[in-house]
Amino acid sequence: AIILGIETSCDDTGCGIVDTQGNLLGEALHSQHLTHLNNGGIIPPIAHDLHRQNIENVVQQALKSASLSLNEVDAIATTVKPGLPLSLIIGAKYGKYLCKKYHKPFIPVHHMEAHALTARMFDKSIEFPFLVLLISGGHCLLAVANSVDEFLLLGESIDDAPGEAFDKMARRLKIKNLPQYSTLSGGAAIELATSEATDFLDFAGIKAVFLRHIWRAEKKGIPPDGVMSGYQNLCASFLLTTTRHLCHRVQRGMEYLARKKLIPPDKQTLVVSGGVACNNFIAEGLQIVCENLNYKFIRPPPKFCTDNGIMIAWNGVERWNANIGVYKNFDDIEIASTSQLGQSVKEDVAAENISCKWVKLSS
Ligand code: ATP
Ligand code: FE
């Protein structure tokens, strides 16, 4: 069978076409990134209008790249939660419209489930259960994927998502005023700046750099582009701190799973995805943890870690193959701005009194 996927949960209008063997047949993506960059953040009504203007074209382009027509597609999968309501509504309405027009079943998709399952399209050896860390613009969560639609949530961020933190940091540092960063996402800009760092700052060092920046601004001595000197070291320190934190949480999750015997020792796999998973430094840190705790480390190609239509089509394939959530009558299916991925563990993993010897990350 052939599944077409539509993604519009945030600021990317995406369409992907995948067959039930997992072959990528076609894809198209329209990113609103540059528009939102100029506005200093996503303005939902603008995202809404851009999705509406581009959705038809993106779907047509994907079909063209696959040399297929909608008649040859067997089902349409579409992100319906979680995300910005004004963004989600465009994809959901268009997906349902196409299903009605061409008499196809509709497969509603949970955006984070799609991020979590993408890896299985590129590495068919990944079997359930596996541990998955999702780090993106809106989420930070650690879960055990037990099946296509059963997740055990070990922990979530209690406030910001890492991608959001990177984006804010990049904005405050104004580094996108410099041409080499101007078109990059916040996270990618910080990663690039880090490549020029000469040192990691300790907390006193981070404080000193910020204080110096404020002092210079007060004296009106800031450079014309508004970018502080030494920002590279600040970026590197920020990235190291984030990486350490993520690695510690993942390690604690792994120790918990081992004690509860929730993943067989010979099947231990960590999948990392979401936009922040594009970061090579974070990936290397997680890899070290995996080596030490005997986990296989898997990350989808970076292009498929950020939002795209292929991951939605693949989620459609997973659901089609398992025969769950494929609807002939779909009028009642609604969008939702928030939606937890799976069941939370009953006990607090952090309070489980796990005494682990932290793996040392080499800098
Ligand atoms: P969610 O999936 O939680 O709904 P989203 O779909 O907006 O959020 P993604 O598209 O998965 O998020 O990821 C976008 C985020 O990834 C942005 O915050 C961006 O800064 C971050 N990002 C992209 N590349 C990198 C990188 N190299 N290092 C760190 N972060 C990165
Ligand atoms: Fe996403």
Image (cartoon, rainbow, N blue to C red):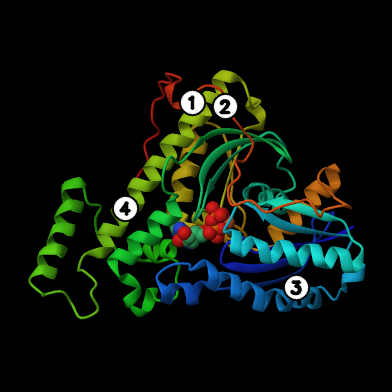
In this view, 199 is above or below 141: below
Q: Give the farthest residue toward the front.
A: 332
The CA span between labels 2 and 1 is 8 Å
Please provide percent x and percent y for residue 95: 77, 64
Question: Which numbered disc covers residue 349?
Answer: 1
Residue at the disc numbered 3:
59
Residue at the disc numbered 4:
238
Question: Which numbered disc covers residue 325?
Answer: none
Task: Say if mark 3 contacts mark 1, CB within 8 Å.
Answer: no
Comparing marks 3 and 4, which lies closer to the viewer? 3
Please provide percent x and percent y for residue 5: 75, 61
Please provide percent x and percent y for residue 70: 87, 71
Please provide percent x and percent y for residue 126: 70, 42
In this view, 287 is above or below 15: above
Going by the numbered disc 1, the residue's amino acid type is Val
User: Which is nearer the N-term, disc 1 or disc 4?
Assistant: 4
Residue 136 relative to residue 77: left or right:
left
Front residue of 200 and 79? 79
What crowding class fits label 4: few (fewer than 14 Cα within 10 Å), some (14-19), or many (20 or more)? some
Q: Give the quadrant of the N terminus.
A: bottom right
Q: Please give the name of the residue rendered at 67% of the width and 68% of the height, measured from the top-left corner.
A: 14
Beta carbon at label 3 within 8 Å of ligand 2 = no
Question: Which numbered disc covers residue 345?
Answer: 2
Going by the numbered disc 4, the residue's amino acid type is Phe
Task: Say if mark 2 contacts mark 1, CB within 8 Å.
Answer: yes
User: Which is nearer the N-term, disc 3 or disc 4?
Assistant: 3
The CA span between labels 2 and 4 is 30 Å
